[in-house]
Amino acid sequence: MTLFLQFLLTGIVTGCFLVLATIGFSFTRRVEGFLNIAHAELLGVSAFTTWGLNKLAGWHILPSAAVGIIVTAFLGLAIGRIVYDPIRRFGPAVLLITSVGVSYAIGGVIDAVIGTGIRTLDIPLATSYRFWGLRITDYQLLVVALAIVASGSLALFLNKTKTGLAIRAISVNPELAASRGIDVQKTSRATWLISSGLAGLAGVMLSVIATLSTDIAFHQILQILAVAILAGLGSLYAVILSGLIVGIAMDVSVFWIPAGYRPLIAFAVVILVLLVRPQGLAGSKSS
Amino acid sequence: MGGMKKVLSGFTALATIASVAVPAVAQADDVTVGVLVPLTGELGEFGKIVAGSVELGVKQINEAGGTKCGMLRTVVADTAGSAEQAIREATKMIDTEGAVALLGPTSGAMVALVDLAKRKETVVMSPYAGTITLNEIGGDYIYRTVSSDLGDGEASGLWLKEKGYKKVAFLVQNEESTISPAQVAQERLKDAGIELTDYVIYNPGQPSYQAELISVLANEPDAIYLAGGQESGVTVLKEAAAGGYGGEWLLTADLAVPEVFDALDPRILNDKAYVEVAQADKSLPEYKAFEAFHKAETGAEPGPFAANSYDMAMLVALALEASDGCTGAAVNSMIRDVTEGGEKVSSFADGKAALADGKDIDYEGASGPLTLDKSGTPAGAYQIMKAVDGAWVDEKFFPASAFE
């Protein structure tokens, strides 16, 4: 039983990382109206910026992470303004394909700048805490805490601030929102900053828990898509639930079936849920 | 996704090539040899070693007057570890550059290139592709200067048995090149009556491998056999240490690089981690001569698979020298002949002189005897290295005879 609960606990942590990685992606989908495949590579930008400052420049992890997130947020904003804004009128399909190109471009630049091999941060080895026979590390606890803080902050921002309410209005009906005096450009800029900043936060956690290679960020895109699709490509709360479901399903499955099938479980869950709810966990049929 | 990414990563490759290859302007009477290696991505470190060692071999061949077909010229391309990219670059090397041999692809690329090699009659050779798939389909235009993965499994099994472990867990990356040797090592464990507590096959590219480690750590093995890449391997090592694992490790060749000690707190590895790697017998005079040449040229010790890579250039040059033609088919027709049943030679210059005297030759490589079996594979020797003070140091050598 303890072993099973350990798988469950690890699954919750995996789910929280997926929430962090997906929440910005879903936010972009909701507001900008397309699947930004380049979102995963933004995790890489943040992870390698953090690594460069921490390992090469010798900075402490906290300022390194802060700069990593800020750089990623502004890079995401720049890409939104320079690449996506001019082609927005061609519709979501063109934006999606373009985002694949952006993903290649970011990945190629990371390859060129970082080069070969593996990278890790100059941070202490994780410390394990034990309770009721279960084990969790400080970095895993950090992932859970950041997922809670990021989701909570985003929910508060969208519900309590003027810009947040404007973003919600635009995500529901851009034309109507614009006709009511909402500054679409400004709101779009805020969206890019927030979603890319969230990718930056996930990238920092990727650099903290994982071993970095130039393609590890892109490896996350399938699971991000799985979580986003399961959530219904829209609702923030559904992303949290969906991330936890996928994370727990993947890790708990290892209790019964070989670990090699773990990624398959993510998509099996998505397929099963979509058979019952084609619109996703919380999405409306129109989304 | 692979396509454009690989094109972009080619920029890095170009920069790397500039540093490892001496650019040569094609002459009408040059013979072109393609160096097809991963210069970017996780295996990039190995690709650079291979490219550099082939260049050393070519330099020595050309200093000895080149082959009867002319001086050797190399063209280098980055596969970025992708079979698709390898096929594209190989086609370009053969059709545009006129390469008679392609040296350096990794396992996946080798398997993907079998049809092309036979169709275009161009020899393809690898210094590190241990995949057992080549045991079946290699041998005609497809060769290697390293033994099959099955040998790595045998060596690992032998080591785990020698260490006297009672309980061993296996963590194996979900790739053919890691699963094949793991299966052999697992069989040897069973034969020796050692308890296999877990046999976990995991997928690489994950941020964390905690779920895979739960059962492994719960069963408290004496040692964990970790057959994984650098990215997954380092994360597993970190997470197992954080999880309180205090046993020993046997790692596979991808982790036999110094970078592992930069990526990890060396205390995780020191005095309790071993790594198994196919390696030349360093006591052989042929290896010592290569080592001295390598040090003189680069100022550094030869890296993993350097001797095997150098030997590829030698085999191609000697096969050209021994054959009647200057094509890939000519190389293919003579490559076995120069590795068995004749006067033993250990350098291109000696081989060239013996062939000029009408003698048959048997090239004894820097990586060891290169007599090729029907799949184009030599018998292997293996080194177990131990992590000591943040570096891999030789612990135990298994010559090819240990497995007879």
Image (spheres, rainbow, N blue to C red):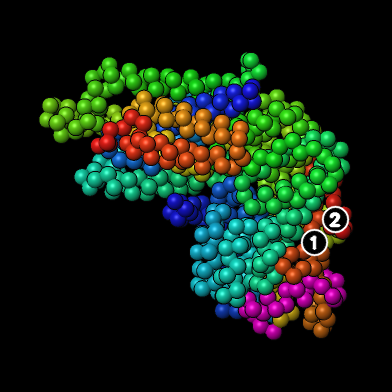
Look at the numbered disc 2 and give the secondary structure of its residue. Answer: helix
Chain containing the residue with disc 1: B
Name the chain under label 2.
Answer: B
Q: Is residue B342 magenta?
A: yes
| Of residues B27 and B327, the one drawn nearer to the viewer in this rendering | B327
Relative vertical location of residue A49 with respect to residue B154 in this rendering, above or below: above
Q: CA distance from mark 1 to mark 2?
A: 10 Å
Label tally: 2
**Residue of label 2:** B403
Along the viewing direction, whichever of A268 and B146 lies nearer the viewer: A268
Tell me the quadrant of the picture where the C terminus of chain B can be found: bottom right
Q: Name the element at disc 1.
A: loop
Horizontal and vertical percent position of residue B291 = 78, 55
Tell me where residue B334 appears, x and y as whole percent.
73, 77
Q: Is residue B360 left or right of residue B169?
A: right
First of labels 1, 2 by sequence position: 1
Asked if B160 appears above or below A12 in the picture, the reply is below
**The quarter of the displayed image where residue B318 is located:** bottom right
Camera sees residue B191 = yes
Residue B56 in view (yes/no): no
**Residue at 42% over, 19% down:** A149
Q: Please, what is the three-letter code of the amino acid marked with disc 1?
A: Ala
Seen from this angle, which residue lies furthest front? A276
| Residue beneath disc 1 | B379
